[in-house]
Amino acid sequence: MRIAGFVKTTLQDWEGKNACMILLSGCNFRCPYCNRPELISGPDEEIDPSIVLRYIKENKDFLEAAVISGGEPTINGDLYKLIGDLRKLKIKIKLDTNGSNPDILDDLVGAKLVDKVCVNIMAPLDHASYSKAAGVDTDVELIKRSLRILADSGIVYEVRTVVVPGIITHDSFVKMLSDLDGLKSMIIQQFDPRVTLDPKMNVKPYPKPALVRMAETAKGYVQRVRIRGF
Ligand code: SF4
């Protein structure tokens, strides 16, 4: 199993829960603004899963959930094994995904192997916009299918969008919202330029009022909108 990183406690990644976060190596996207480039190919050193599982077991008194993130967890061949091991510990599981793997998502959600899903949506769901944001030629129909699976399943899910200057503007954000109509929960995430996959993406983030304006606009499409990263 390729565990690339482990955050013992996070209060941000599952609202209302004390969670830990398990970061899996490997990603099929190459988002130029990616803040975790070391996870795309895998870090120099990986963490023994038994250390992570033992920590969770020993701290079940305050840990309520585990967030599986990456990278892109759904391309990791050990995802099911990890989920199985976490389920044995009777801990809630949230999956972070880029939405490019609807078959796996359908299976996980259908089998109730995860309790919550967060999909990172990066741009309007058209081929040119999305391929630019993801850094690879992207079949947006896969992402749309993932969103439909989640909407039809009844599982708790949310969309997270990192607003990166040069990737998304207010206008393209509005276009993206129209693709997400009916969504219940959205996180607008401030871009962090300190570490990026493409060094040219070291651009100045939008000021907070620009994100507040996006959030106000989003409220016309999404029931609940939060801004994160300040
Ligand atoms: S930001 Fe993009 S490249 Fe980085 S882990 Fe997420 S989906 Fe992969």
Image (cartoon, helix red, strand yellow):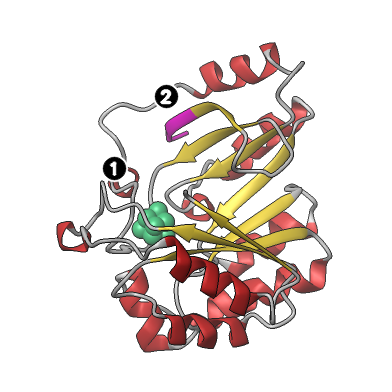
What residue sits 44% from the left and 61% below the top?
A: 208
Determine whether, in the image, residue 118 is placed left or right of residue 78: right
Question: For this rendering, which residue is in front, 203 or 130?
Answer: 203
Q: Is residue 116 magenta?
A: no
Amino acid marked by disc 2: Ile
Judged from the image, the secondary structure of the residue bearing numbered disc 2 is loop
Q: Quadrant of residue 137?
A: bottom left
Mark 2 neighbour density, 10 Å: few (under 14) some (14–19) many (20 or more): some
Q: Which residue is mark 1?
A: 38
Q: Which residues are magenta?
A: 1-6
Q: Which residue is mark 2?
A: 47
Q: Is residue 27 visible?
A: no
Which quadrant of the render holds ligand 1?
Answer: bottom left
Q: Is residue 2 magenta?
A: yes
Question: For this rendering, which residue is in front, 10 or 86?
Answer: 10
Judged from the image, the secondary structure of the residue bearing numbered disc 1 is helix
